[in-house]
Image (cartoon, grey):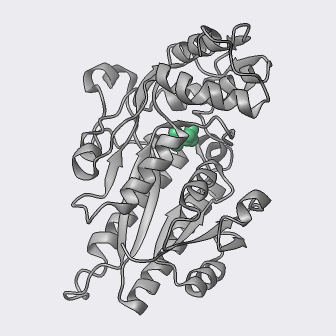
Amino acid sequence: MSDRTILITGAAGEIGHGLINALAGQPGVRLIAMDLREVPEELHHKVDSVHQGDICDRAFIEHVISLHRVNEVMHLAALLSTSAERAPEQAHEVNVQGTFNLMRTAAEQAQAYDEPVRFIFPSTIAIYGVEPSEKDELGPIREFQALRPITMYGANKLYCEAMGRYYGRYYRSITRGDRRPPIDFRCLRLPGIISADTLPVGGTSDYVPEMIHASARGEACVCFVRPDTSLPWMMMPECVEAILKLAKAPPLARCVYNVASFSATAGEFAEAVQRHFPGAELSFEPHAGRQSLVDTWPADVDCLRAREDWGYEPQWTLEQAMTQYIVPTVRARYGQAPAPEGAIT
Ligand code: AKB
């Protein structure tokens, strides 16, 4: 691919940090960071330009995209599932109208320069709505199964996937003639993501990162779901790598992909955390509302499409993720000495 001018929305968030750190300094890459919040100072020197503003403000989006002649968008800004249930109408504005503003403006830019804009969209396992009675029968869920989200967040993301498919395949299909669609839309359905560096805000899969960070700080943690709650997971470096790999893949026949490294229950995570942080104080007090959301999310996802189409490879199992990433990184983050030789790490 020739020079890339990449707009990253939600740049101050968890995945934004990871992407900026991974892309900064790559030859031929210009990074434009955008967030409603202030983008942390430590990221400023890694990007070419920083814009603080609201994706719901169309004039702001048009200004930024045309100013930099953006040819790739990594659209991370969103209200996650728990935040969205607390403010559903606002979530719709941000998650749907904000995404529409970006996609529409990117399409206009593509048409002006006759060059499609690549649009990378992290979607979510919350677009699925699996009945508890079907979970065993369905097994690892495939991209076209159980598309019955029960949350505003899941509904928003599923609609935006459809909008992306429209702009990427069918835009103005009856009047466009043989001109290419304006958007090259590529979407990953992310599982629960765990970062050893940052804590998520407003998600429902946050119970695992909360357990890990609290235990590393020597604080007690009350998990808000039942120990038998099972979800698919991946670590932040794997998530960043998958996004970058999808973004660089040659043209693809399909545009929506499941990705995840492993499935694990909250109880299995609690045991792993207790093994690595002896003395960790973990207990379970399920919150009925939040539990009811994760109960409809799949316990496992099928990633065959991503493997076949762009070579996605899950990296770590739960234990490998603990020893190779989580434990050393959180210990360093909270200023703890590495565990003595022979100890489980
Ligand atoms: C959330 O919990 O809302 C997110 C997600 C699974 O998309 N982490």
Among all residues in the image, which is located at the extreme front?
A: 341
Q: Quadrant of residue 68?
A: bottom right
**Where does ligand 1 appear, by image quarter?**
top right
Compared to 126, does 170 lie above or below? below
Count of numbered labels shown in the rendering? 0
Question: Residue 16: x and y, percent?
Answer: 61, 55
Residue at the spot 68% in from the left edge and 41% down from the top edge: 198
Left or right: 95, with 36 as reference point: left
Residue at the spot 32% in from the left edge and 70% down from the top edge: 168
Compared to 339, does 78 lie above or below? below
Left or right: 104, with 171 as reference point: right
Q: Quadrant of residue 262?
A: top left
Question: Residue 272: x and y, percent?
Answer: 57, 14
One can see residue 224 in this view: yes
Compared to 89, does 53 lie above or below? below
Question: Residue 341: x and y, percent?
Answer: 63, 11
For the C terminus, the quadrant is: top right
For the N terminus, the quadrant is: bottom left
Residue at the spot 63% in from the left edge and 59% down from the top edge: 10
Left or right: 64, with 149 as reference point: right
One can see residue 55 in this view: no
Q: Quadrant of residue 139?
A: top left
- Camera-side residue of 136 and 75: 75
Among all residues in the image, which is located at the extreme bottom?
A: 112
Question: Residue 233: x and y, percent?
Answer: 47, 32
Residue at the spot 74% in from the left edge and 7% down from the top edge: 279
Left or right: 132, with 221 as reference point: left
- Camera-side residue of 296 and 331: 331
Compared to 225, does 112 lie above or below? below
